Image (cartoon, grey):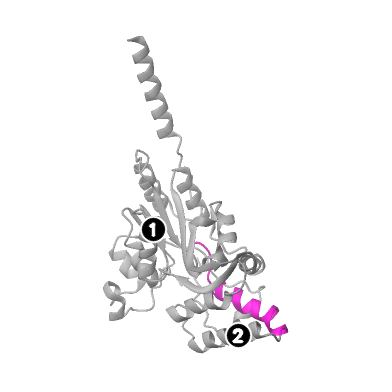
Amino acid sequence: MKRLFSTILISVICLSASLTAQTYRHIHGWSQEINDRIEGFLNGTIPMTERKVAVFDCDGTTFGQVPYYLADEALYRYADLVLKERKDKEAKEKLKILDRMVRDGNNVGKPYVEDRVHFLAGLTPEEIETIGYNCYHDSYRGKFYPEMKQLIANLREYGFEVWILTASPEILYQKFVAGEFGISNVNILGAKCVIRDGVTTGEIIPPIPQDDGKAHTIETFIKAIPLIVGGNSRGDMDMIHESAGLKMVVNPDDVTVRGPEDGPMAGHTVKSYWEKEGALIVKCDDVRDPKVKFHTESWKIRENRANPK
């Protein structure tokens, strides 16, 4: 009987320790009200034994997208610094793809997003990682939101798997995003392509994490219902609705009233829609660094709207 009592006592102590080991750390830069809501949500997940999954959009949600998406800057930068100096067939074909992308102009549209993958085809994964990392290091290194880094640190403290979704080529983003957040690069999901004999191809593996494809990516690759999902734009609507718990929106647009093609968001701005849905709306500083010269600018790609905090 003593042995049984001791076993039960030890189990209770261990359980108590595991429940109190997870400590919320205040996120500097967000209000006490926002912190209280996040802390209350996280504390409510402590007893859970199943997978705890958090999913976030990448550009504009975890780091700045002003004035240009990093994926665009990485490609146009590579064209300016490398391809324009070459006269070979491969370089000419890649520059033709960029010309097509510029003529398209819709850098959130499906053809444009797919052409980013086509442009990189033929390079090794290591070469693509380097292109993305060098662009991040030179032009975006200070643009990761400190509030989101603190949030993700809290999520990991509470035993969450953290996944980042991007419509950009995932190999382009994996190294620097994983490094910033201290998570595995396999948790950075983006536009995937077939890799054959150590070289990337233009053969795209669906779904692409864009619009409703982000929701399909969760179901296809993550295979769990997330407890928290965060995004920033209309394209994240379907993904955010996958959350079984906290819905978060970063710097939502409050200018453009969405049309009938935007489904349930029609007649609303992104911000007013998510206010109606009870999402947690947060602000992060996203403005242009005047000291950084962007190659994308000379290619006449549209700028993203600034979000000063």
Count the labels in the image. Answer: 2
Compared across the picture, whether 220 is left or right of 286 comes to left
Give the residue drawn at x 59%, y 60%: 175
Magenta-colored stretch includes residue 66: yes
- Residue 297 in view of the camera: yes
Give the residue drawn at x 56%, y 60%: 177
Real-space Cα distance between discs 1 and 2? 39 Å
What residue occupies the far right of the structure in this picture? 85
272 versus 2 height, above or below: below
In this figure, which residue is indicated by the disc labeled 2?
A: 93
Q: Where residue 163 appears, x then y in whole percent? A: 46, 56
Counting other residues with Cα less than 10 Å from the Cα at mark 2, is it few (<14), some (14-19), or many (20 or more)? few
* Quadrant of residue 87 within the rendered picture: bottom right
- Can you say which quadrant of the picture contains the N terminus? top left
What residue occupies the far top of the structure in this picture? 2
Q: Where residue 113 appears, x then y in whole percent? A: 48, 76
For this rendering, which residue is in front, 259 or 95?
A: 95
Give the residue drawn at x 28%, y 80%: 260
Compared across the picture, whether 92 is left or right of 242 comes to right
Q: Give the foreground label among 1 and 2.
A: 2
What residue occupies the far front of the structure in this picture? 197
Q: Which residues are magenta?
A: 62-86
- Residue type (three-letter) at the residue carrying disc 1: Val
Say what secondary structure mark 2 lies in: helix
In this figure, which residue is indicated by the disc labeled 1?
A: 229
For this rendering, which residue is in front, 276 or 129?
A: 129
40 versus 220 height, above or below: above
279 versus 227 height, above or below: below
- Residue type (three-letter) at the residue carrying disc 2: Glu
98 versus 5 height, above or below: below
